[in-house]
Image (cartoon, helix red, strand yellow):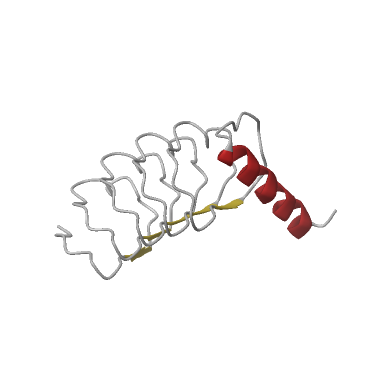
Amino acid sequence: MNKLIYDVINILIIHIIIMNMNIDYDSNLSVLTFVHNYNHPLSNSLNQLTNLSILIFGCAFNQPLSNSLNQLVNLSILLFGGYFNQPLSNSLNQLTNLSELTFGHYFNQSLSNSLEQLINLSVLTFGYYFNQSLS
């Protein structure tokens, strides 16, 4: 089976499982995209996806991250949809391989020291309504 078909099947399986909030298996999935209207708490539902390199949230996602991303140590690209507007606190601290971070239009939260651990970050994009200090 070619890699694209394998990834698409995995994305469909993950979508079905996430909708039931019951991810409990190891996966070689590298890209996960949430549907446009997905807006449910993540809790520990992503913990087994340690090979994930790209995570894209749909437009409607606006849930606290807490420690839900802690196990995604291989994540390199993280994109939040337009409505995401939650405090980051230390939710990104374990993402030291992250190179690209994009926030949607409505993100307007203080960054304080929430990006300090992102030592490989090379692209940081904010949406239209971001109006916080970068220092």
Horizontal and vertical percent position of residue 43: 44, 32
- Horizontal side of residue 29 vs 132, given as left or right: right
- Horizontal side of residue 76 vs 18, given as left or right: left
The vertical placement of 23 against 88, above or below, is: above
The vertical placement of 31 against 19, above or below, is: below
Horizontal and vertical percent position of residue 117: 32, 45
Residue, x 65% and y 30% (percent of image)? 25
Residue extending farthest right: 1
The number of numbered badges drawn on the structure is: 0
The vertical placement of 126 against 74, above or below, is: below
| The C terminus: image quadrant | bottom left
Horizontal and vertical percent position of residue 120: 40, 54
Q: Quadrant of residue 3?
A: bottom right
Residue extending farthest bottom: 128
Q: Is residue 50 visible from the viewing direction of this image?
A: no
Residue extending farthest top: 24
Residue, x 18% and y 52% (percent of image)? 110
Horizontal and vertical percent position of residue 104: 35, 63
- Between 70 and 66, the one lying in front of the other is 66
Residue, x 36% and y 40% (percent of image)? 65
Q: Is residue 99 visible from the viewing direction of this image?
A: yes
Residue, x 35% and y 60% (percent of image)? 103
